[in-house]
Image: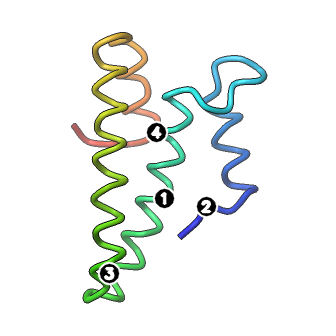
Amino acid sequence: MAVKTTKKKTLISTFQSHKKDTGSSEVQIAILTEKVKELTKHLKTHQKDFHSRQGLFRMISTRRRLLNYIKQKYPKKYISLIGKLKIRK
């Protein structure tokens, strides 16, 4: 369940903090969120795909750790990021 390159480029351009930023926490969270959405759609049709489910849980925990980091360091960025991505917390 890889994110298409065009979608990934738009996510990077939307969430980057400067022109050459491709790996900041905000960008990583945005890409992980898109992967989670795609994998969730897959798992709705394939309920018994336990290997993909395990990968989904791993992605969610990675995203959670990155969100906790941003929440501690930059609370205002955290609130705006959650609003843009429509993630509930």
Q: Residues within 10 Å of mark 3 (few under 14, many from 20)?
A: few
Q: Quadrant of residue 7?
A: bottom right
Amino acid carrying label 1: it is Lys
* Residue that label 2 marks: 3
In-front residue for pair 52/19? 52
Disc 1/disc 3 C-alpha distance (Å): 14 Å
- Mark-to-mark CA distance, 4 and 3: 22 Å
Contact? badges 2 and 1 (CB < 8 Å): yes
Q: Are marks 2 and 3 in contact (CB under 8 Å)?
A: no
Q: Measuring 36% from the left and 74% from the top, which residue is drawn there?
A: 52
Q: CA distance from mark 2 to mark 1?
A: 6 Å
**Dot 4, crowdedness within 10 Å: few (<14), some or many (≥20)?**
many
Cα gap from disc 1 to disc 4, whole angstroms: 10 Å
Question: What kind of element bears circle 3?
Answer: helix
In the rendered structure, which amino acid carries the disc numbered 3? Answer: Lys
Which quadrant holds residue 41?
bottom left
Q: Could you tell me which residue is drawn at 31 percent across and 85 percent down?
A: 49
The reply to whether the C-beta atoms of the residues labelled 1 and 3 are less than 8 Å apart is: no
Query: Relative to the observer, which residue lies in front, 7 or 25?
Result: 25
Residue that mark 4 sits on: 29
- Which of the colour schemes (rainbow, by chain, secondary structure, one colour) is used? rainbow
Secondary structure beneath disc 2? Answer: loop
Q: Which mark is residue 35?
A: 1
| Image location (x, y in percent) of residue 46 | 34, 88
